[in-house]
Amino acid sequence: MAVRMMVYVGLLYQDLIRRGEVLNKKHLPPVLPIVLYNGDQKWTAATDIAELIPKVPGLVSDYLPQLKYLLIDENQYTEADLAGLKNLVAAVIRFEHPANGAALIKLIELLNEWLDGKPELKRIFAIWIRAVLLRQSKHTLVLPKVNDLKELKMSLAERFDEWAKEYEQKGIEKGIEKGEALLLQRLLVRRFGALPNEVVNRIATATSEQIETWGDRVLDAVTLDEIFRP
C-alpha cells in the first residue's frame, strides 16, 4: 500500500501539472494520503515507503524516498463515535455500513448540508455513494446515474418505497396462503378426522394453486386419498 500511495500521489501531481492547476511560483499543493481500512484482520502493512527500504550508508541514504499515509481503521469506531463527528471521513465510514434505508437517506441529507456551496464535492460524493450501493448489492439495485446528492436521495427514496410496497404485498399474499391452508386443514379434519403428519406437512408446504385444487375436492371426495390424487 505504501508503494501504491506514492504512485497515486505522483500521478495526481502529474495531472495537476498537465492541467495547469498548480500554486503560485509553480508550487504543488499539499496532499494528505489517507487509507480507509474496513477489513477484519489487524492492519500490519507499512505506512511509510521508507519502512520498506533497508538503510544504507553513504550518499544513497540521503536520497531514499519517504512518503507516509494516514491509516484510518474503520473497525476502531462505533456508530455512536462516528455520529458525533461532523467530518467527511466519518461520513464515508458510515456510508459503508448504514443501519437501514432510513439511516442512509438521513446521511445523504446531512452530507448535503455539510457540503452546501460546494457543488463539485456534492457531485463526487453522489457518484461515489451510488457506486458503493451498487457494489454492496452486487448490482441487483437499480439506480439511475446521478450528479447531485438531492438526485441520489430522491432515487433511493423512490426505490425504498417500491421495496416497502413489494414487502407489504408479499406479506399479504403470504398471510392469505396461510389462511387458506389452515381452512383446508380444518375442513379435512371435519370430513375425515385427525390428519396424518405427512398430510399436515404437505398442506403446510403447498402452493396456493395446490391448496385451491385440494379445496375444490373436499365436498365430493369420499376418501382422503382422493383429495390429493395427481
Image (cartoon, rainbow, N blue to C red):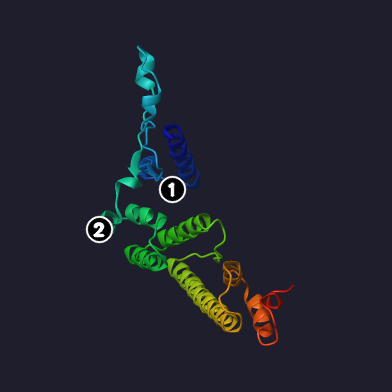
Determine which residue is flagged by label 2: 84
Q: Mark 2 or 1 closer to N-term? A: 1
Measure the C-alpha gap from mark 2 to mark 1.
Answer: 35 Å
Left of 222 or right of it: where is 130? left
Check disc 2: other Cα within 10 Å, few if <14, some if 14-19, many if 20+: few
Q: Where is residue 144 in the image (x, y as percent from the top left)?
A: 55, 66
Left of 219 or right of it: where is 54? left
Q: Is residue 53 above or below residue 92?
A: above
Q: Is mark 2 on a helix, strand or loop?
A: loop
Determine which residue is flagged by label 1: 21
Check disc 1: other Cα within 10 Å, few if <14, some if 14-19, many if 20+: some
Amino acid at pointer 2: Gly
Q: Nearer the viewer, residue 28 or 79?
A: 79
Give the position of the C terminus as an image quadrant.
Answer: bottom right
Q: Which residue is located at x 50 percent, y 75 percent?
A: 171
Q: Which of 164 and 201 is in front in this view?
A: 201
Tell me the mark number nearer the camera, choosing from 2 and 1.
2
Q: Nearer the viewer, residue 186 or 206?
A: 186
Amino acid at pointer 1: Glu
For the view shown, which residue lies furthest in the top direction? 58
Q: Quarter-wise, where is residue 191 in the image?
A: bottom right
Q: Position of residue 135 (x, y in %)?
A: 52, 54
Left of 114 or right of it: where is 153? right
Left of 194 or right of it: where is 78? left
Give the position of the N terminus as an image quadrant.
Answer: top left
Q: Position of residue 126 (x, y in %)?
A: 45, 61
Q: Which residue is located at x 66 percent, y 79 percent?
A: 214
Q: Quarter-wise, where is residue 45 in the image?
A: top left
